[in-house]
Every structure is written in C-alpha cells, then in structure tokens.
Image (cartoon, rainbow, N blue to C red):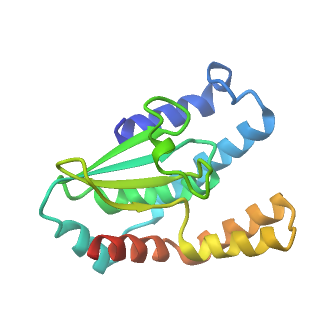
Amino acid sequence: MQFEEYVSYFKAIVENPENYEGYQDEEIFNYTKLNWSRMNRWLKKFEPNAETASFMNGIATKQHWILITEPWCGDAAHSVPMIYQMVKSNPLLVLDIQLRDSEPYTINQYLTNGGKSIPKLVIRNEQGDDLAVWGPRPQGCTDLFVMMKGKGAEFNDIKEEIQKWYNQDKGVAIQEELVDILSR
C-alpha cells in the first residue's frame, strides 16, 4: 500500500479497534494509540537534513522501497514517518508499505536473528534485485536494546529508554545509515 493508505489504515484501527484482529487487547491498543501520536509528531517535526535530502533527490534510477511494518510496532512509529519524509520528494523512489502479518509475508525472507523484527526496509532496483536492507532500528538503538536486555531490564524500562533514544537522536542515525548503505 502507499503511505497515505497506511496512514488511513492506522487511523481506522485507532478509531475502530474492534474491526481489526489483535487490537481488542487493551495493552496493544493503548500502545498503538501512542504510536499513532508519535508517528504524527514525526510527520510534523521531522525533515531530512540537507545532506540526506540532496542524496535522496540525487538518486536518478527508479528504486522500489518495501517497508514492512505494523501499527503496533513502537520502532515503526519513529522510523516509518522518517523514511517517508526522506523519499517523498523523489518520484523515482517508490515507497510500498507492507504489513508484516499479512500477505505477501515478505518479512519471511528478511528475518533478524530468526525473528520477524520490524520495521524492515528492503530497497530494490527496477529489476527487483535487493540493493540494501535496513532495520529493524538504527544501530545505536539496537545496541541500547541488546545491552538492556542483557542486563535483564524489564520490557517497559527498555521501551522507555528506546523512546528517549529516538527523541534525543531526532532521526540523525537513520539518515546516516540509509545514506551509507545506499552509497556502497
């Protein structure tokens, strides 16, 4: 689906969770509502820096960016709107949002340590060859997650620290990482 369709789908879940499997669980639904707020905040506040904007706008061949996600995913609430903001001004960068838990189940080809971690970005050329794969989160955030998990931290504490990391980073790391993997 296109980004606008994803936003509409996300909004429909927030407004009518009873119509969507899995969102009747109060904890998942409350976290999804929080993700909705976070995503919308990034859509209003995040703009790619000059280097990233120049790089993305300078891509002169068509690329298919497949972004695998779900509204309940906390990391996606940050990364998905940032990725959209980075590609939206270059018509050669076609962003396709795919839900992890729905067909075509592309995530099964891009597991992280055997798991279906999201968001996962797959960047392909016109022939359908993978140019790059990124995700599920920027490396600095992954390092924080692994460190806290290794110390036996409670999941809610991990989520809180990850949220702080995203707020302090302001999208710098994801921009650097995407420019880097596409520059190789």
Q: Is residue 31 above or below residue 151?
A: above
Q: Residue at x 47, y 64 (%)?
A: 45
Left or right of 166? Residue 152 is right
Q: Name the residue nearer the viewer: 115 or 13.
A: 115
Q: Is residue 3 above or below residue 161?
A: above
Left or right of 51? Residue 68 is right
Residue 90 at x, y percent in the picture: 20, 58
Q: Locate the N terminus and report the quarter of the image it occupies.
A: top left
Left or right of 14? Residue 120 is left
**Residue farthest to the top?**
19
How many marks overall?
A: 0
Q: Name the residue nearer the viewer: 94 or 107.
A: 107
Q: Residue at x 59, y 57 (%)?
A: 75
Residue 88 at x, y percent in the picture: 28, 55
Q: Is residue 111 above or below residue 147?
A: above
Q: Residue at x 27, y 76 (%)?
A: 183
Residue 4 at x, y percent in the picture: 37, 39
Q: Name the residue nearer the viewer: 75 or 10.
A: 75
Q: Locate the C terminus and report the quarter of the image it occupies.
A: bottom left
Q: Is residue 45 above or below residue 52?
A: above
**Residue farthest to the bottom?**
51
Q: Residue at x 82, y 65 (%)?
A: 157
Left or right of 110? Residue 141 is right
